């Protein structure tokens, strides 16, 4: 009997620990748990704990590196009961590691029996929790949609983000739920990017959350657009100006060829800015070529000026010379008058007047008349031909020639004087000749002669 009691006691000692040992089933309800290493925020796990053993209270704890918080400690779970348990796990001290982390924790029953479980979560930096990007744009775009995507199972409240790129700057405060994306429509000013080449540009985001700052980057694709606009402006008649403007309103380097045609006459009076890259002549035509590569936002301006003032002046002088030559060729008798200063012994103001008579053709009965200026008198001595009549009162002198042969030149000179001094410009009237040419009475006049007293010289017109 005693032996049977000892046997029962030994069997009870072997079986009782198995009956009293902890027996829990753990089912994780949450997923994709993440810890932001820059923040002082725990990672949260939602568990369903089923007690397959005896009722009791259970403690959740970890041995190294992390602190576990649960709503109630210990947790009462009756036999056969399933209870929701939320565990919040925080690192003890600064934890800079990133990546996937396997976390071992212990569940201890009131009888000190234990059960070891494992949880897995990821540790990421604040900037790596987000993805930013945008739609494509081109040089004609007026707006752009950008986005920020919360890639993690973490709720960001009052998130401040400053977006920047070569195309715009934008700042916004908003909340971003786990695994959600927020879109923003940005208005663009073409002046901000008219000189940018097509390609990929960096979109930057400065993220501020809970007094922590991080940066992340995305890409904006600036698609190619070839757009070269040409404007031409013409104005002026005598000085004709042609302005050709070519503007690259696209976003790729664009080749431009401009050809201007001139004839061999107009090219002489034409200037260019800038100078052409090549000049080719084809018969009477001359071709000027500008071959340039224009960057986005740049303008090539070609100014072509043709100054017709110079050829017009040349033509005017040629016509004037021709008219004078023709007029001169029709004149049978040419008169030319000159005046020069003469020193008088009595100190009077005195001038020597000379008239040259040139017969281009044979003429007869020539009557030459010259008039004296007012307030002057004629000196009684004459050089060259003697006058036929001197009219002191009428201030007139006359010479008569029976005939003059073709090419014959006669020189007539006399001196006039005045008791009054002359200051400034002194004018003498024209001389007149009346003659007979083949029975036709004709008339010729000389130039007017001038004398400037201060210069002591002569001037003829």
Image (cartoon, helix red, strand yellow):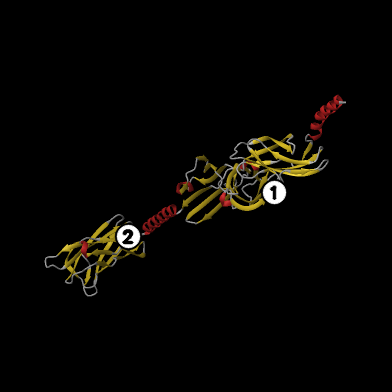
Depth check: give the residue in front, 28 or 233: 28
Q: Is residue 5 left or right of residue 417?
A: right
Left or right, 12 with respect to 418, comes to right
Which residue is at a point 22% across and 60% down the rendered structure image?
Answer: 457
Residue at the far right in the pictured view: 1
Q: What element carries label 1?
A: loop
Q: How far apart are marks 1 and 2 (CA)?
A: 114 Å
Residue 333 is labelled as 2
Would residue 195 be visible to someone looking at this image? yes
Q: Name the residue under label 1.
A: 177
Residue 151 showing in the rendered view: no
Image coords of residue 347 (percent x, y): 13, 67
Q: Is there CB contact under 8 Å for labels 1 and 2?
A: no
Among all residues in the image, which is located at the extreme top? 3
The quadrant in which the N terminus is found is: top right
Disc 2, SS: strand
Please determine whether, in this image, residue 405 is positioned above or below residue 277: below
Q: Nearer the viewer, residue 344 or 52?
A: 52
Q: Position of residue 377 (x, y in %)?
A: 19, 71
Viewer-proximal residue among 12 and 363: 12
Tell me the residue at 21%/65% (across/down): 453
Circle 1: is it few (<14), some (14-19), or many (20+) Cα within 10 Å? some
Binning the other alpha carbons within 10 Å of mark 2 as few (below 14), some (14 to 19) or many (20 upward) gives: many
Residue 185: x percent and y percent?
66, 52
- Tell me which corner region of the image, top left, top right, bottom left or bottom right, holds residue 21: top right
Name the quarter where the C terminus is drawn: bottom left
Disc number lying in front (1 or 2):
1
The numbered mark at residue 429 is none
Q: Please give the count of numbered marks on the rendered protein.
A: 2
The location of residue 279, given as percent across then percent down, is 50, 40
Pick the front one: 2 or 313:
2
Q: Earlier in the sequence, mark 1 or mark 2?
A: 1
């Amino acid at each position: 009997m005693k032996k049977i009691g000892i046997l029962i006691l030994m069997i009870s000692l072997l079986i009782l620990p198995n009956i009293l040992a902890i027996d829990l089933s753990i089912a994780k309800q949450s997923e994709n748990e993440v810890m932001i290493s820059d923040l002082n925020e725990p990672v949260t796990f939602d568990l369903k704990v089923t007690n397959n053993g005896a009722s009791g209270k259970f403690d959740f704890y970890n041995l190294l590196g992390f602190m576990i918080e649960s709503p109630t400690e210990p947790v009462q779970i009756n036999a056969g009961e399933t209870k929701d348990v939320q565990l919040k796990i925080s690192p003890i001290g600064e934890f800079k590691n990133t990546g996937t982390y396997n976390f071992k924790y212990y569940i201890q029953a009131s009888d000190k029996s234990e059960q070891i479980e494992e949880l897995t979560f990821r540790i990421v930096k604040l900037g790596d929790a987000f993805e930013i990007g945008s739609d494509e744009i081109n040089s004609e775009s007026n707006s752009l949609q950008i986005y920020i995507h919360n890639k993690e199972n973490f709720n960001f409240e009052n998130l401040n983000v400053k977006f920047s790129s070569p195309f715009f700057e934008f700042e916004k405060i908003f909340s971003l739920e786990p695994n959600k994306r927020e879109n923003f429509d940005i208005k663009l000013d073409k002046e901000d990017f008219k000189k940018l080449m097509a390609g990929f540009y960096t979109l930057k985001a400065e993220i501020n959350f809970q007094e922590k700052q991080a940066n992340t980057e995305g890409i904006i694709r600036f698609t190619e657009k070839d757009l070269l606009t040409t404007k031409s402006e013409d104005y002026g008649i005598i000085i004709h100006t042609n302005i050709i403007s070519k503007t690259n309103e696209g976003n790729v380097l664009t080749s431009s060829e401009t050809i201007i045609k001139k004839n061999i006459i107009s090219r002489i009076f034409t200037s260019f800015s800038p100078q052409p890259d090549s000049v080719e002549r084809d018969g009477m035509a001359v071709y000027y070529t500008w071959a340039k590569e224009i960057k986005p936002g740049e303008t090539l301006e070609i100014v072509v000026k043709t100054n017709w003032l110079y050829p017009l002046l040349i033509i005017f002088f040629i016509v004037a010379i021709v008219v004078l030559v023709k007029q001169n060729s029709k004149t049978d008798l040419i008169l030319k008058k000159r005046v020069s200063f003469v020193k008088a012994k009595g100190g009077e103001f005195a001038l020597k007047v000379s008239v040259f008579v040139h017969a281009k053709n044979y003429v007869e009965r020539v009557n030459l008349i010259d008039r004296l200026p007012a307030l002057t008198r004629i000196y009684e001595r004459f050089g060259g031909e003697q006058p036929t009549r001197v009219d002191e009162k009428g201030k007139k002198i006359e010479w008569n020639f029976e005939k003059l042969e073709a090419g014959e030149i006669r020189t007539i000179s006399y001196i006039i004087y005045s008791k009054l001094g002359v200051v400034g410009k002194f004018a003498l009237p024209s001389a007149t000749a009346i003659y007979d040419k083949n029975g036709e009475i004709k008339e010729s006049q000389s130039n007017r002669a001038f004398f400037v007293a201060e210069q002591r010289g002569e001037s003829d017109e």
